[in-house]
Each structure stands twice: as structure tokens, then as C-alpha cells.
Image (cartoon, coloured by chain):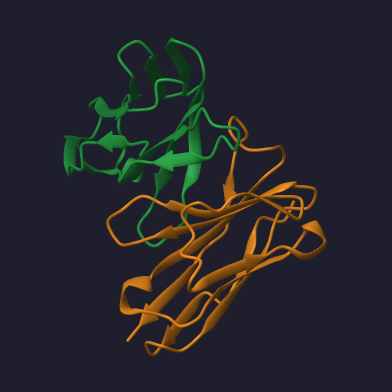
Amino acid sequence: QKEVEQNSGPLSVPEGAIASLNCTYSDRGSQSFFWYRQYSGKSPELIMSIYSNGDKEDGRFTAQLNKASQYVSLLIRDSQPSDSATYLCAVSSSGSARQLTFGSGTQLTVLP
Amino acid sequence: EAGVAQSPRYKIIEKRQSVAFWCNPISGHATLYWYQQILGQGPKLLIQFQNNGVVDDSQLPKDRFSAERLKGVDSTLKIQPAKLEDSAVYLCASSLGAGGGDTQYFGPGTRLTVL
């Protein structure tokens, strides 16, 4: 059973702070990693994808991947109240179907 | 560009009844996915189609759930008979390519309540 683990939170940070979200995965052959944001009552939307070890930056978001440690993280700089949502880590399997396995999500609240 | 369309948005049924959900993916997207998201959990893949063929249905409870994708476009997911534990949001997603590294775009979901 391929697993993706996230801290369930909730995680609260003050406005302007850095929010750090973490994810570990069990399938050592995984090649593609994604962070989705899900507002309450809405469907997930992709905010970052990462495929290689290291950091990938997009605006206020930075994804970090360490395949040796089977660890992927998301940093949100200058957090805004509008960033308050559940963040889902998703990992594609190493099998032929390459299906996505999602973690249970980390609920983030940014306090004004 | 139109997004992934789903209907209905909400459905309430009694246990042992049947229900069907419909999904229209983004035009030109080859791969279509059905996910089940129970409150407080991440989406769980039920079935993945590439064009009109099934790529993965290993987590689909086949004794009660069925899905089809006719002509490689629209898809329907059916539950018959429904159980209380089927209460969840059913999300449809599509991607341009064959999955894996491709971005999946989600529809608004159908919230199912089984009483």
C-alpha cells in the first residue's frame, strides 16, 4: 500500500510569516510530486509540481524535494489570510498507471 | 477554456438506493479520473480512464460501483446499492496526457449524502 503522510495540523501562522508544510511518501520509485490547495467546500487546485531534487520557486511558494529521504515540503512566504486552506500533497506512483496518491492534507490558517 | 463539468452538485439518497454522477472533462483531455473524498481525508482514486479504456480501477468497490467512459469523452459513475459509508464528495478530474506527471484539473465535485 503506497502511502503519503502529512501533518494534519491545524497549522496557524501570523500574516506575513513563513508557513512550512511537510510530506513523506513510501514509494521510493515515485517521480512526480504535487501540492494542491483546497479551500473549504471547493475542489483541489494545483499550485506546485516538482520532479527533481532541490528547490523550485514560484512567487511566494517554494517546493522542496529530497528523494533520498522521501520527503517533499512546501514553503509559503509572506503568508496571507487568503492562503488559509487545506494543502494536499500528491505523489505519482512508480507503476504503469502512474496514479496519484494524496495525503490527508494539512489545514493552514493565516491569522490577520 | 471550459473546465471539468460535473452534475449533479448535490445528491441525497437513502441507503440501498442507486445514484449516478456525470462528468464532462476538458476538451481534448485523454485521461479522466474519478476520486472519492471523505470529509477530512485526501481524494482517493477510484478509477482512471485513458480515452475509453480503464487504466486503473484497483480501488473501485466493484460489487457496488461501476463507471464507464463512452467514446472517450463523458463519463458516468454509478453506485448501486449505496451504503452509509459512501457519503463523500465525488470528484472528477482530467489531464491532457496519460497521467503521472500531467496536471490534473478537478471539477467542482458532487456531494453525496446517504441516509
In the depicted view, which residue is nearer to us: A12 or B111?
Answer: B111
In the depicted view, which residue is nearer to us: B43 or A2?
Answer: A2
Report the residue that reaches farthest toward the right: B71
Instruction: Say which quadrant the N terminus of chain A sits in.
Output: top left
Instruction: Say which quadrant the C terminus of chain A sits in.
Output: top left
Position in image of residue A93 (x %, y %) = 49, 32
Would residue B108 appear left or right of B75 to someone viewing this image? left
Q: Is residue B92 above or below residue B110?
A: above
Q: How many tags in the picture?
A: 0
Position in image of residue B10 (x %, y %) = 47, 78
> In green, which chain?
A
> In orange, which chain?
B
Position in image of residue A20 (x %, y %) = 25, 26
- Which residue appears at 76% of the width and 55% of the height? B52
Position in image of residue B12 (x %, y %) = 42, 85
In the depicted view, which residue is nearer to us: A14 or B88?
Answer: B88
Would residue B72 appear left or right of B32 to someone viewing this image? right
Does residue A112 appear in the picture of this structure? no
- Which residue appears at 47% of the width and 24% of the height? A30
Does residue A92 appear in the picture of this structure? yes
Q: Is residue B11 above or below residue A91?
A: below
Q: Is residue B70 above or below residue B11?
A: above
- Which residue appears at 42% of the width and 12% of the height? A55
